[in-house]
Image: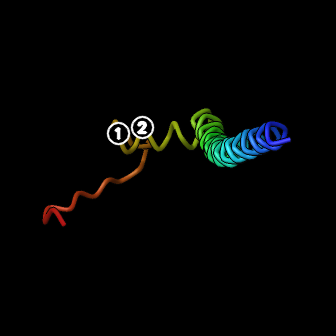
Amino acid sequence: MNKRKLVIFAITVYTSVTLIQQQYTIIRLHKEQRDLNKRIEMAKKENERLQKEIKYSKTLDFVRKIASDELGLVKKGQTVYVDINGK
């Protein structure tokens, strides 16, 4: 009878340890899943922003802004004023 109790005790301890380890693994995997879902959402927002930027870069307004701001071009009849104070 003593052997039987020892076997049952050993099985109970083994089962308990296994269940605790599995619970920790489940908790860790849930945290990892939440972190990955956050990264996915951030990537989706960044993708959306970039898609809007691409769409805007194909507009005439964008071309005019680049021509004016970066290339210094002006429209015919447009007057350019330069701030000599540098402020």
| Residue drawn 82% across the image and 41% down it | 8
Residue 81 relative to residue 26: left or right: left
Dot 1 amino acid type: Glu
Residue neighbourhood size for the residue with mark 1, other residues' Cα within 10 Å, grouped as few (<14), some (14–19), many (≥20)? few
Residue 15 seen in the current view = yes
- The local crowd at label 2, few if under 14, some if 14 to 19, many if 20 or more residues have their Cα within 10 Å, is some
Side (left or right) of 58 relative to 80: right
Q: Residue at x 74, y 39 (%)?
A: 10
The structure residue drawn at horizontal position 72% and vertical position 44%, both measured from the top left corner, is 13
Q: Which mark is residue 82?
A: none
Q: Quadrant of the N terminus?
A: top right
Given residues 71 and 4, the one toward you in this image is 4
Image quadrant where one finds the C terminus = bottom left
- x, y (%) of residue 2? 80, 42
Cβ atoms at labels 1 and 2 below 8 Å apart:
yes
Given the image, on which type of amino acid does mark 2 rest?
Ala
Q: Which residue is mark 1?
A: 70
Q: In this view of the protein, which residue sits in the foreground, 63 or 40?
A: 40
Read off the residue under disc 2.
67
